[in-house]
Image (tube, rainbow, N blue to C red):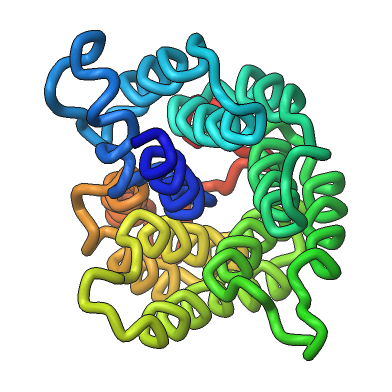
């Protein structure tokens, strides 16, 4: 039973890489935590997810599984904007217990966290370190979905470094790569994650806004807002409202660094 549970842990970690949506998180501990948490777990409630993961971490777990749960906990903390605590959890992870792909996963999550702590330079360095970890002997990524997530994180980091073209290239690559990796699964249950998709279109809107391209910014925000039930879909709707209220020919000011409370 625990083996199945920890297989689901890994699936959920991958699903949560750069997104605050965790569509598969309700599976975690479903047969082990009902007494503490109740019969259902809303995947869009990061506060409850944090409690969920802490319940698991309070138990005696195989050491490798504990490391993966800490990565999940950091994702949920990032969703609430508690990036400092997320970084502390990530820094508790014992990398020697993880496979190379899992270390790449950890690097991606730590990079994402660092961006929202105002350290996009180190974030890009982390992402550069994932390259060798992801490549197989044939030079092709061993995990296309993880590669897509890393591209998405790179796009966010480059935007906050002011490298708008690099940000756009990486975010578009993330969208394209996830669609391709999902289509290769030949499984109707595999779908492009709406939370990640909304997030990437939102940041692409921010790129256009930074480049003073209001028409393109609006188009991209609209793509994100189409996923209305996701956090970044809601942020995109607010951005569209701000665009509508801005004087003709002007765009709202883009903050130099991301707000911890809005990440």
Q: Is residue 4 visible?
A: yes
35 sits to left or right of 5: left
In percent of width and height, residue 57 lies at 51, 17
Up-down: is 122 above or below 93? below
Q: Nearer the viewer, residue 254 or 257?
A: 257
Tell me what residue is drawn at x 69 percent, y 78 percent: 141
Q: Is residue 259 visible?
A: no
Tell me what residue is drawn at x 74 percent, y 49 percent: 103
Labels in figure, total: 0
4 sits to left or right of 126: left
In percent of width and height, residue 181 lies at 46, 80
Extreme residue toward the left, this view: 39
The image quarter containing residue 218 is: bottom left
In percent of width and height, residue 222 lies at 28, 66
Q: Nearer the viewer, residue 256 or 263?
A: 263
47 sits to left or right of 60: left
Tell me what residue is drawn at x 30 percent, y 60 percent: 194
Up-down: is 5 above or below 186? above
In percent of width and height, residue 4 lies at 37, 44
Tell me what residue is drawn at x 28 percent, y 55 percent: 244
Quarter of the image with the N terminus in it: top left
The image quarter containing residue 199 is: bottom left
């Amino acid at each position: 039973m625990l083996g199945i549970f920890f297989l689901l842990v890994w699936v959920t970690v991958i699903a949560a890489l750069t997104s605050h949506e965790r569509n598969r998180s309700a599976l975690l501990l479903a047969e082990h935590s009902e007494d503490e948490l109740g019969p259902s777990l809303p995947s869009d409630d990061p506060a409850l997810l944090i409690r969920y993961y802490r319940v698991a971490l309070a138990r005696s777990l195989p050491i490798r599984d504990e490391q993966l749960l800490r990565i999940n906990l950091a994702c949920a903390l990032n969703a609430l904007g508690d990036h400092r605590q997320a970084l502390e959890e990530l820094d508790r992870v014992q990398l020697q217990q993880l496979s190379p792909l899992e270390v790449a996963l950890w690097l991606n999550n730590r990079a994402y966290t660092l961006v929202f702590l105002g350290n996009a330079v180190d974030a890009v360095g982390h992402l550069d370190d994932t390259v060798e970890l992801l490549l197989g002997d044939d030079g092709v990524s061993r995990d296309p979905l993880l590669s897509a997530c890393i591209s998405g994180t790179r796009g966010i980091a480059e935007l906050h470094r002011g490298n708008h073209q690099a940000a756009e290239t990486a975010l578009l690559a993330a969208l394209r790569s996830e669609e391709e990796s999902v289509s290769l699964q030949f499984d109707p249950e595999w779908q492009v994650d709406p939370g990640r998709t909304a997030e990437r279109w939102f940041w692409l809107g921010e790129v256009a806004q930074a480049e003073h391209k209001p028409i393109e910014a609006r188009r991209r925000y609209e793509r994100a807002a189409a996923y209305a039930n996701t956090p970044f879909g809601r942020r995109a709707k607010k951005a569209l409202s701000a665009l509508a209220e801005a004087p003709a020919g002007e765009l709202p000011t883009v903050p130099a660094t991301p707000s911890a409370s809005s990440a």
